[in-house]
Amino acid sequence: MQARIRSARRTDEVMTVVFYAVGGFFLVLILILAGYIIINGLRSYYPGIFGTTSSGIGNQLFNTVYLVFWSLLISVPIGVLAGIYMAEYAKPNKLTKFLRISIESLSSLPSIVVGLFGYLVFILMTGAKWNLMAGALAVSILSLPSITTTTEDAMKSLPKSYKAGSMALGATHWTTIIKVLLPACFPRIITGVILAAGRGFGEAAALLYTAGQSTVINWNNWNLTSKTCPLNPFRPGETLALHIWVMRTEGSLNPNSEKIANFSAAVLVIIVLLFSLAARMITKHIGRKAVGEKA
Amino acid sequence: MESTILNFGTQADAAGHRPAALKREDSMSNVHASKKTKGYYFRKEYLGRGIATGCGLFIVVLTLAIGVFLLVRGTGTFTRFHHSILEFLFSSDWSPVDTATGSGGGVGAAVFIAGSLLTCGLALLMITPFSIGAAIFMTEIAPKSGEKIFRPAVEIFVGIPSVVYGWIGLTVLVPWIKNVFHPKMGGYSVLAASIVLAVMIFPTITTVAADAIRSTPDAFRKAGYGLGSTRWQVIYRIVLPASRSGIMTGIILGLARAFGEALAVAMVIGKTRAFPKNLLSPTNNLTAEIAADMGNTASGGEANMALWTMALLLFLISMLFIFLIHLISGKGILQVEN
């Protein structure tokens, strides 16, 4: 009996050490990985890397931001409204169940499959060339489910008294949603949108055959219908993430390709980190507010 | 309450005249010089409700459209070019004709399917013990620092874009494998792809497993400790069995992510159309093949159609994963992921 207890204690100690080792290993791994990407990337800096020539990433950086902007412009209204429907209007019937399965399916589709759907519908069927808008649409398909579920969860977690109070004052259901419920879950929705944007910045597989793998921008051309105007969304718009993919095979054509890819990787990781930091701060802020309300 | 208000609105709108009580209210609001009548709010209610419902329906239509388009396009290999499904799945003869109308080549995708299965399976084998270990560490062993330090760190893992993982794999891992093991074909290998995938799915499995472990009722643990168990005994005999279905869900989600990953794998797998002889030989997989050749093949031709069939296969596999998760956990992925 004594021996069994001793051996159980020893096993417990050994396993505790093992768990600390596993935890520590991954903590160190992530620090080294993130540190390596950022430091190695920043060390690859050379003058002109932010430029808009083939040795700079200025155009790609602009395309990335512009594409994410368009994708949010499309997916946020649809996602938020669908979330409102799910939280407030949907009745527990077959259609709602099917909608939930649809959102699930969308959220688990491989991004390359979404990219191929975009390629088929926005490029092949419209007969257009690669364009930034097709990429934005593909990315918005990817971010739609997460924005919808974030909105639904945020609305469902609000205190019942908010809705009851507003309705008791004679407001219609829709007025209650727009004037009371939506503002109350605004921070959580914003957090969800920021996270979706962060994912959009790093997306590449869905853009391979939609946004295209090249970009030509003439920064003096502000004619919106022109193929080289920066703001025309119907021009090929290679993004930063895709640029890394393209650079891997261009070693012979572009002597700086490795440096460009390193630097692009660092820029992407920094952007994503900043976005998740912003989301974290907002979440923390909501937490504090909720605690304050209780007290 | 809600329905009475709505019925009231329909009555008033349909009949065209309003009950006396309402009329008096209307005249009162006229005194306050408000131009917005009750009808305005009811119209807005129906409009808002209609638009929200429309957006919900849009998601259904979009999902169906993706399924239908992939189904129509992906079955072309079997209907238009008369290949058998068995040939596609089990033959390794991949020589489709790459012209708009020509046919007669082989469309065996067995090499790509095997590549996908092998790399994902290996990644899962490699990372699952560590993921569960890390999940236990952040919930049972060091919950405070787990929440404060470990969770944000895992979120960084999630945030790093997959191309960046691929690029690090290409510039660090592949040369390292080459220098250490000296394989004949260079460092591009099944091993490199598996390691990249393993690192990518680590956060998925860890967070889902950690949530499952955390939601085990505390009474279970207290009962265990009350009987004199050590912490490891509580974890191994009580907590892990109790959170089994959650952990399985995490593993399947990780597998789904690995299966759909394209560019990171494509950068390190070596893109060689042959079954791998060992872990250090290069091969190819479904996603990498699609990513590489979809734009280079003549649209609608045999080669192009075979690639679409592979995309359809990916779609079906991701549906299968959803089904499995429902089967295991009894709830949807959305509840699990949040």
Image: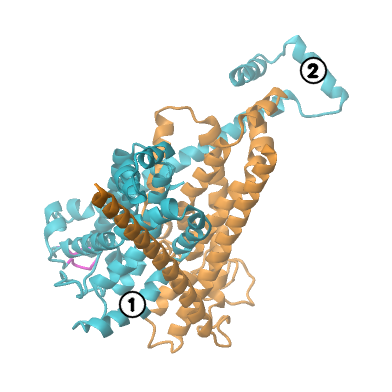
Chain colours: A orange, B cyan
Task: Provide the residue designation for mark 2.
Answer: B25
Question: Mark 2 — on which chain does it sit?
Answer: B
Residue furthest front in the image: A2
In three-dimensional space, the C-alpha distance between marks 2 and 1, rounded to whole angstroms, equals 75 Å
Question: Mark 1 — on which chain does it sit?
Answer: B
Tell me if B229 is positioned left or right of B19 in this view.
left
What residue is rendered at 54% in x and 85% in y? A45
Q: In x, y percent, where is residue B313?
A: 25, 53
Establish if B114 lies above or below A294: below
- Main SS of the magenta part reads loop
Task: Provide the residue designation for mark 1.
Answer: B173
Q: Is residue B258 magenta?
A: no
Between residue A122 and residue A175, name the one nearer to us.
Answer: A175
Q: Earlier in the sequence, mark 2 or mark 1?
A: 2
Q: Quadrant of residue B261?
A: bottom left
Element marked by disc 1: helix
Q: In x, y percent, where is residue B245?
A: 32, 43
What residue is rendered at 16% in x and 66% in y? B94
Between residue B330 and residue B40, name the one nearer to us.
Answer: B330
Q: In x, y percent, where is residue B63?
A: 39, 45
Q: In x, y percent, where is residue A62?
A: 57, 70
Amino acid carrying label 2: it is Glu
Q: Residues within 10 Å of mark 1 (few under 14, many from 20)?
A: many
Q: Which residues are magenta?
A: B96-103
- Tell me, for residue B250, which label it has, or none: none
